[in-house]
Image (tube, rainbow, N blue to C red):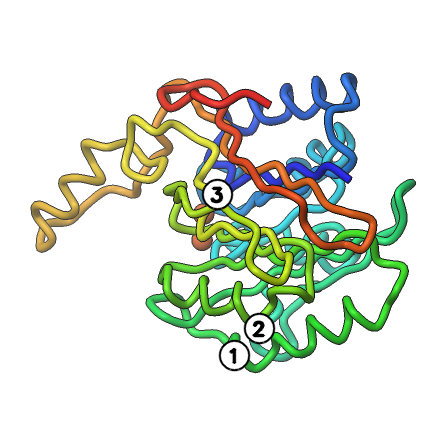
Amino acid sequence: MKTLFIGDIVGRKARNFAIEKIKEFKKGKCFDLIIVNVENSAGGFGVTPEICDQFLLNGADVLTSGNHIWDKKEIISYINETNKLLRPMNMVEGTPGLGITIIDTSFGKIGVANVMTNLFMPKSNPVFELLNQIKLKFNSNENICFSLVDVHGEATSEKLAIGHILDGHVSAVVGTHTHIPTSDYRVLENGTAYITDVGMSGDYNSVIGMEKKAAISRFQYPNNKHPRLTVSDGPPTLCGVVINSKKNGLAESIKPIRIGGVIDNIGI
Ligand SMILES: [Fe+2]
Ligand SMILES: [Fe+2]
């Protein structure tokens, strides 16, 4: 089975570019499954119901998110009624929406989970305490042919530790949130595909997708008043990983994919 996971979509240009590419992939039957992290797809902050529908209607199968999921308030009622847009599982009890889902596809049952790490991140429940829950949910259902965990977090060490714990229990553990792709993609020793961060889909001539002059000024002059950051408007790069998996649900390979913009270097 061939799965495409696309990293954090930042802003309108990257969103439109990703949707065009997803349509092409769908038409060309390039992938069996497409999962997209949409947490920054609405103006860099959050996601709206219309944007989710746009992704899902054009070929994305499941959408994941992270700490920015609530930036657009209208998403609250939407997330309550869908199992195809996830928010991190370890948000406090009573949080709307789901953090883990199993969906039916023509290939069989697919499991997707979204967790948020704890180091240097907004407060959430301890992430290491819920990993068993993921193992149980995805292992106990023998019909699951592919499972993926989006680990949304800042610290590389913490994400890798989670990858090792889930190794052999899920098909893939992919990191998001830093918006910077890492080159440590590999299949871990027990058969789980892993990457610490797939990188964002946005303008890389920026500071993690935001207009660079204003973002730099915040670091240079931390005591000044600063306007709200805006999405950088240059040509976007679509960044993700392609995972090939076997019938038993474990991974065969994982490869990065980067299309367009300033870091376009890998085809599919
Ligand atoms: Fe994030
Ligand atoms: Fe993000």
Helix, strand or loop under label 2? loop
> Which is closer to the viewer, label 3 or label 1?
3
Image coordinates of residue 180 in percent, x first then y, are 37, 42
Which residue is found at the position 56% from the left and 82% from the top?
129
* 150 or 10, nearer to the observer: 150
Q: Secondary structure at mark 3?
A: loop
| First in sequence: mark 3 vs mark 2 | 2
Question: Where residue 110 sits: x, y (%)?
Answer: 80, 52
C-alpha separation, residue under disc 3 versus residue under disc 1: 24 Å
- 74 up-or-down from 94: above or below: above
**Label 2 vs 1, first from the N-terminus:** 2
Q: Which residue is mark 1?
A: 125
Few, some or many residues within 10 Å of mark 2 (<14, 14–19, 20+): many
Report the residue at 54% width, 20% height from top. 267
* CA neighbours of label 1 inside 10 A, class few (<14), some (14 to 19), many (20+): some
Q: Residue 249, percent across and down?
A: 77, 54
Give me the C-alpha separation between circle 3 and circle 2.
21 Å
Q: Residue at x 40, y 41 (%)?
A: 181
Cβ–Cβ under 8 Å for marks 2 and 1: yes
Disc 2 residue type (three-letter): Asn
Q: Residues within 10 Å of mark 3 (few under 14, many from 20)?
A: many
Q: Which mark is residue 198?
A: 3
Establish if 43 lies above or below 101.
above
Residue identifier under label 2: 90
Q: Is residue 64 something that shows in the picture?
A: yes
